[in-house]
Image: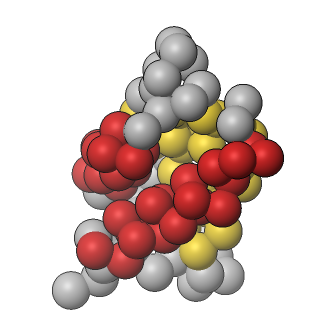
Amino acid sequence: ATMKIEKVAKAGTLESNDIVIMVYPNENDTVEIELESIVMQQFGTRIREVIQETLKSLGVTSVKVKAQDKGALDYTIGARVETAIKRAQ
């Protein structure tokens, strides 16, 4: 079952060790991720992977994601993505 992004939604905060995830409908039927992170050098690739894995597990194949990371751990990133996607339904 694929989950459709109906509207813009967000989850998370800009506090330390958290991440803000904003999701937007994407007409291109692709997953686009725009990421800003205070730990981009060390963890940029991993953060993208976590976002992509979470989207995949939720059946999301078409979305624009804007992420502003303040050093969130993997499970926090996953939880924020999941919440934002659910709010976008």
Q: Taking 63 as reference, is 73 above or below it?
A: above
Residue at point 48%, 33% (across, down): 72
Residue at point 42%, 39% (across, down): 73
Percent position (x, y) of residue 49? 53, 67
User: Which image quarter is the C terminus in?
Assistant: bottom left
Percent position (x, y) of residue 39? 70, 37
Q: Left of 19 or right of it: where is 2?
A: left
Percent position (x, y) of residue 20? 52, 32
Please say whether residue 62 is visible from this viewpoint: yes
Q: Is the image coloured rainbow, by chain, by secondary structure, or in one colour?
A: secondary structure
User: Given the current orientation, which residue lies at the most extreme front position?
Assistant: 42
8 vs 59, nearest the viewer = 59
- Tell me the quarter of the picture where residue 77 sits: top left
User: Given the current orientation, which residue lies at the most extreme left position?
Assistant: 1
Residue at point 54%, 42% (across, down): 22
Q: Left of 3 or right of it: where is 65?
A: right
Q: How many marks?
A: 0
User: Given the current orientation, which residue lies at the most extreme top position?
Assistant: 15
Please say whether residue 24 is visible from this viewpoint: no
Percent position (x, y) of residue 48? 59, 61
User: Which image quarter is the N terminus in?
Assistant: bottom left
